[in-house]
Structures are given as C-alpha cells and as structure tokens.
Amino acid sequence: MTCEEFLRILDEAPEAGPLPPSLAGHAATCAACSLALRTEGLLRTAHDWAERPSLPVERRAHVLAAARMRGMFLARPGQVLEEAGVTAAVLLAALAIAWIVFPSLAERVLPPAAVEWAAPLTDPVLRWLQPVASQVRAMLSETWGAPLLGLTAFAVVLSAVFCFRVLSPARFAAR
C-alpha cells in the first residue's frame, strides 16, 4: 500500500466507528502515515475528552467589549464614513481659513519683536515650503487646478480622519 492509497482510505473511512484494520499494517512501517493515523484517531474521539474552553468573566468581558468596538465599524461603515467626511470637510475649511487669514492677521496682531523672535524658527520651514507653494500657484493658474487641489486635500484629510477613527475606536465607541 502506498501513502496516497493510505490517505485516500483514511479520508473515505466513515466518521463514526473504528478505522479499517488494513491501515495498521502500512502505518507500522511509515512514520508519516503513523502520525496521520494517530491524529485521525484523536480527532475521532475528541468529542469524548475535549472540554469547552472557558475564559474568566473579566477576560470574556474585555474580549466582547473589544469585539463590539471593532464591530461597530463593520456594522455601520456608511455612518462612520459619513462622519469622517463631515469632519474632514470642517477641518479642511478651517485649514483654508487659517491659510488665508493668519498671515495678514499675524502681521497686524503680533508685535514686531515677536515676529523677529519667530523668524529664525519659521524661515527654514518657509524656505522648505517655497518650492511646493510655487508649484501650487502654477497648478491654480490652470482651470482644473483648484478643483484638483481641493479634491486632493479632501482625500488626504478624509483618509487621515478615517484612519484615526478606525485605529482608535475607543474614543468614538461611546456614541
């Protein structure tokens, strides 16, 4: 008998009752088939000796709470995505207003000493952003530039908000 025939007979044997005695001869000479025969015997009698696994009450409550928090996003993904979209739109509007208003407001409100003090801190950042700003200005001169920039910014902020909500569900589970 070959190993393939052995495994076929083992698979075709009825689930209830003892295994065919013809399998014992080959299993005595083949280590792999002997392991398969012993494993099959354990699986056939497992319902007699196996107990139901149990968790302590505290651990079970913790596991169920974690599953509920994670399942919240699976049960209502549309609502979570809609909330993330609204949050992203509000954040994007606030960033746009800050981008437009802050430079002129900073010049009017901040004293010149504060501007001079902050210059060494802000100049490297502004020099780093200057090439990006020139490319954005060039893109905005095109007819498709503003909508594309707006959609790109919205997609980036939406992704960030959605990832934050999914990765830290405990903050939003109380809703």
Image (cartoon, rainbow, N blue to C red):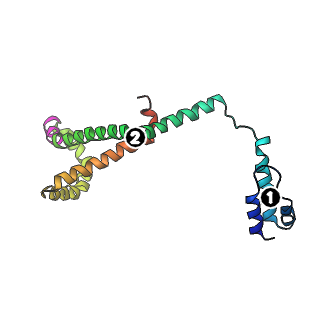
Residue 40 x/y as whole percent: 77, 54
Q: Gap in Å between the C-alphas at discs 2 and 1?
A: 47 Å
> Tag 1: residue type?
Leu
> Tag 2: residue type?
Pro
Magenta stretch holds residue 104? yes
Q: Is the magenta stretch mostly helix, strand or loop?
A: helix
Residue 31 location, quadrant: bottom right
User: Alpha-carbon neighbours of circle 1 within 10 Å: few (<14), some, or many (≥20)?
Assistant: some
Residue 21 x/y as whole percent: 86, 59
Magenta stretch holds residue 143? no
In the displayed structure image, the side of residue 2 where residue 102 appears, left or right: left
Above or below 135: residue 44 = above
Which quadrant of the rendered structure holds the C terminus? top left
Residue 49 visible? The answer is no
Please tell me which residue lies in front, 174 or 153: 174
Label number found at residue 37 = 1
Above or below 44: residue 77 = above
Residue found 48% across the figure and 35% down from its top:
69
Residue 20 location, quadrant: bottom right
Residue found 25% across the figure and 42% down from its top:
92
Above or below 36: residue 161 = above
Residue 55 x/y as whole percent: 67, 34
* Element under disc 1: helix
Residue 112 visible? The answer is yes
Give the residue number, with chain letter if any, for mark 2: 77
Q: Give the range drawn in magenta.
A: 102-109
